[in-house]
Image (cartoon, grey):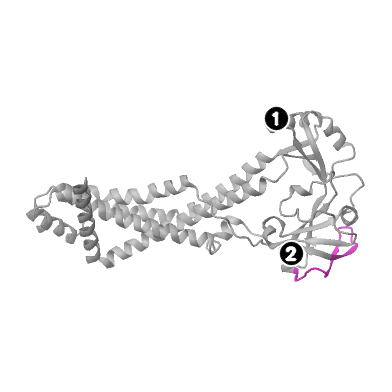
Amino acid sequence: MNQWIARQRYLVDFTLASLARRKTKNAGLLLVFALLVFVLASVMLFASALRHEATMVLAHSPEVILQRMVAGRHDLVPPGYVERIGRIRGVQKIEGRLWGYYYDPVVKANYTFMAVVPAPASGFAARPGAREASAPPAAGEIVVGSGLARHRGVQSGNVLSFRSYSGKLFSFRIAGVLPADSELVSADLVLTNQADFRAFFDYPADHWTDVTLSVANPQEVRTVAQKLANALPDSRPILRDEVSRTYQSIFDWREGIMLALLSAAILAFAILAWDKASGLSAEEKREIGILKAIGWETGDVIRMKLWEGLLVSLSAFLAGYVAAYAHVFHFSAVLFAPVLKGWAVLYPKFTLAPAIDGLQVTTLFFFTVLPYATAVLVPIWRAAVTDPDAVMRG
């Protein structure tokens, strides 16, 4: 065993010396290889981190959201709906929510207005990151997200005015700004009390935007959702699992779009690997002929070249993957963020937590390192089994 290890070490030493003799060519090859791995790994790491972040955020969302539908459109929930839902077996913790969108022509962006209603009639806790405001703002006051405050240049104590859809002008004093660490879900958020919300949007009394509820037995969520649909034919139950799958599909689609756009780079790498497999340069053939002439066995030559392919591909893979990790988690993936995150005027600023998918790393490894490392075997074998004199003559 020790003899085998020593032999492999000598082969690696010789391979490194051989690579150093052609350092310009190998450095260029290493750079191209590492750049390809960097691009592919950046896309995969960023999409994986976004999926992980979405899963963490949605873990705090309601198990079931019930919307009332009129002519296929989302409509207000009328009085009596909450009581009817409460009579369905398995339903618990029913909460009506008040929320809506408002377009601000000043920054040309949409805000999300939400009423903080005291428990137990509030679904406010269903929106993570906004739970810091446990009590509703006082009359005439609002709490805003840090993204909104940054774009409007306001802070606590300032006054913001909005013209409602009915044409009335409402002025609110900013009672507070939500913490920056909740910006992923609260960048565009405006929190009000129930009375101000209903006055601003001209909401009828006892009507809700939608209703959230939890289920006593998590295994019966779909069963309860079916009971809701049967008891309230004009309603649409939305399950947390369905929302999560939708987000996962969106990120998968965007990742696929990026990889499709990078297909030219993948094709270029395939051509490079094929070129490597199609034959050896005259210098490499001469080197193999010399090694055979001085007594190297065919197996030693093949192992030496296999080490060469592994050293180049592994070095490029590690360099590209480490660079991709730094690009995504330390520099916020500045090259690909607009494509994978989408766009918005009030764009949240947030730092992604490192999330590495082992299956993606393995897939990337098998599609980059192994093809290149094994591409050298066929031409090396042909040269190694040929007479040394014939090889050196080309």
Residues in magenta? 152-173
Instruction: Kindly identify the amino acid type of the residue bearing the numbered disc 1.
Output: Glu
Q: Residue at x 88, y 59 (%)?
A: 138
The correct choice, above or below, for 168 with respect to 202 in the image is below
Give the quadrant of residue 191. Answer: bottom right
The residue closer to the viewer here, 9 or 361, is: 9
User: Which residue is at a point 66% across and 49% down the rendered structure image?
Assistant: 57
Q: Secondary structure at mark 2?
A: helix
Instruction: State left or right for residue 160 relative to residue 23.
Output: right
244 vs 320: above or below: above
Q: Amino acid at mark 2?
A: Leu
**Along the polypeptide, which appears first: circle 2 or circle 1?**
2
Residue 331 on the magenta span: no
Residue 182 screen position, x and y as percent: 69, 57
Name the spot of residue 137 as percent of width and height, x first: 85, 58
Which quarter shows the N terminus?
top left
Q: Quadrant of the C terminus?
A: bottom left
Label 1: few (<14), some (14–19) or many (≥20) C-alpha neighbours in 10 Å: few
Residue 220's tag is 1
Q: Indicate left or right for 150 with 255 as reference.
A: right
Q: Which residue is mark 2?
A: 148
The question of residue 162 being in magenta is answered with yes
Q: Relative to 171, is 232 above or below? A: above
- One can see residue 180 in this view: yes
